[in-house]
Image (spheres, grey):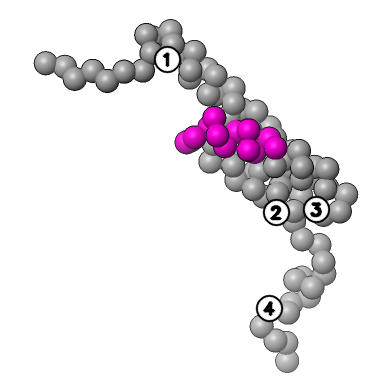
Amino acid sequence: MASYGSSSAASSGSRTNGLAIASLCCGIVGLFILNIVLGPLAIVFGVIARRQAGVRNGAGMAKAGIILGIVDVVLWLVLFAIAAGNGGAGWYVGG
């Protein structure tokens, strides 16, 4: 009888790198909110995870996180340029 949580998959020792998962999550969430914060975090986490890829699995996730982090930063720059071209961001309470 196997005890709780002791499956053969859990004890095989091949676990995905946590930084690769964090990089991918930051990259995905950064597409929608806080892209100037989460984009660089996704890039940094992805680079560190890629360096550790020889030890743990997750090199593909880390690469995807890096790419999404770059997309986040570029998206922020584009949105910033559009806002600057339109006279900046401001509140208009019409009357």
Asked whether the viewer can see residue 31, the reply is no
Residue 47 occupies quadrant: top right
Q: Amino acid at mark 4?
A: Gly
Determine the secondary structure under disc 1: helix
Structural crowding at the residue carrying mark 3, measured as other residues with C-alpha within 10 Å and reported as few (<14), some (14–19) or many (≥20): some
Q: Amino acid at mark 1?
A: Ala
> Does the segment drawn in magenta span residue 36?
yes
Count of labels shown? 4
Mark 1 in CB contact with mark 4 (< 8 angstroms)? no
Q: Which residues are magenta?
A: 32-44
Left-right relation of 71 to 82 = right
Structural crowding at the residue carrying mark 2, measured as other residues with C-alpha within 10 Å and reported as few (<14), some (14–19) or many (≥20): some
Asked whether the viewer can see residue 39, the reply is yes
Task: Identify which residue is drawn at 23% across, 18% down.
Answer: 92
Q: Is 90 in front, or is 28?
A: 90
Q: Earlier in the sequence, mark 2 or mark 3?
A: 2
Residues at marks 2 and 1, CA–CA distance in whole angstroms: 36 Å
Across and down, in percent, residue 58 comes to 76, 49
Q: Earlier in the sequence, mark 2 or mark 1?
A: 2
Residue ID for mark 2 = 18
Residue ID for mark 3 = 57
Residue ID for mark 4 = 5
Disc 1 versus disc 4: nearer the observer: 1
Disc 3 versus disc 1: nearer the observer: 1
Residues at marks 2 and 4, CA–CA distance in whole angstroms: 19 Å
Task: Identify which residue is drawn at 42% across, 15% down.
Answer: 83
Residue 61 occupies quadrant: top right
Residue ID for mark 1 = 83
Determine the secondary structure under disc 4: loop
